[in-house]
Image: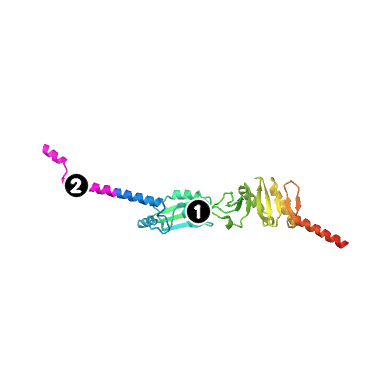
Amino acid sequence: MNDFAVYERRSPSWLDQGNSLKVRFLARASALLLLGGAIMSGLAQGGYLDYEGSPWMQLPGKAAGIVGMAAQEITITGLEHHEPEQLLSAIGVEPGGSLMGFDAVQARNILQNLDWVQSAKVQRLFPNQLVVEVKEREPFAIWQRGTAYYVIDKAGAAMSGLEASQMVRLPLVTGEGANVAAAELINQLSAYPDIMLQVKAAARVGSRRWTLYLDNGITVQLPERDWQQAIAMADQLNKTQKILARGIRSLDLRLPGRVTVEVAEIAAADMKAADKKTVAGTN
């Protein structure tokens, strides 16, 4: 019985040798894989594989395509002022690229954090479809702050994805706080198209009041309070007396119930020259 027990505990020699070979093979294969992975990781992190047309950069997409996980069909709706490439770059997707590990919820959060996106919806339709719906913030005005120009929406939020030079038809406002106060001013001016069409820019002064700059060089200084009534007064004076078409430098409406007009120097000079001619003709 003792001999039988000893025999049961021992393995055949050929089995021991086979297990030993398998262990050595797996150990060497694992070591080679780790070494290869370390080398590839170092090359990738060093930027040696990151160039246009690199076959290594295309491997994830090709591998995903084999198993049906590549972005073969991408549908994007709602873009008006931006390009699809800007959106896809933000969420790290390329047409034909890999969708393995893609997180639709995270992608939506990324898009909604972009300053030009008001809302976003992202759907991953397995295996290889991606549907993205966005609503852009609407450009409302150009805000000049120092030497920088920003496209802003109606709430005054800057939209970095748009170039101000491409939005020259938008109203221009300048000064601190002008971005958040612009909507109220522009909406009020829109009720007086004769003045609105002449406004070239509006400057926020001391974060308290507005000065309008007209395209004919005239400035209209509005009061801190009741500036809406001041605009209505300027419009009435322009309709009845054509005051904004005369040779004046500025129209000051800052004092309640009082209108101060500064005559332009060039107009004063012309009047003086005309008086001299009159006197000479009389003599």
Q: Is residue 74 visible?
A: yes
- The residue under label 2 is 17
Q: Tell which of 229 and 8 is nearer to you.
A: 8
Whether the magenta-drawn stretch holds residue 249 is answered as no
* Mark before the other along the chain sequence, 1 or 2: 2
Numbered label tally:
2
Q: Residue furthest right?
A: 283
Residue 225 screen position, x and y as percent: 69, 45
Q: Is residue 240 visible?
A: no
Q: Tell which of 222 and 23 is nearer to you.
A: 23
- Residue appearing at x 30%, y 48% in the figure: 31
Magenta: main secondary structure: helix
Say left or right for 141 vs 127. right
Q: Amino acid at mark 1?
A: Val
Numbered mark located on residue 252 in the image? none
Per the image, label 1 sits on a secondary structure element best described as strand
Image marks 1 and 2: residues in contact by CB distance under 8 Å: no
Whether the magenta-drawn stretch holds residue 22 is answered as yes
Disc 1 crowd rating (10 Å Cα; few below 14, some 14-19, many 20+) is many
Tell me the quarter of the image containing the C terminus.
bottom right
- Residue appearing at x 39%, y 52% in the figure: 44
Say left or right for 176 vs 83. right
Q: Amino acid at mark 2?
A: Gln
Which picture quadrant has residue 5?
top left
Residue 4 vertical position relative to residue 244 in the rendered view, above or below = above
Residue 252 screen position, x and y as percent: 73, 49
Which residues lie in the magenta part?
1-30
Q: What is the CA distance from the residue labelled 1 to the residue labelled 2?
A: 64 Å
Numbered mark located on residue 134 in the image? 1
Per the image, label 2 sits on a secondary structure element best described as helix
Residue 139 screen position, x and y as percent: 57, 54
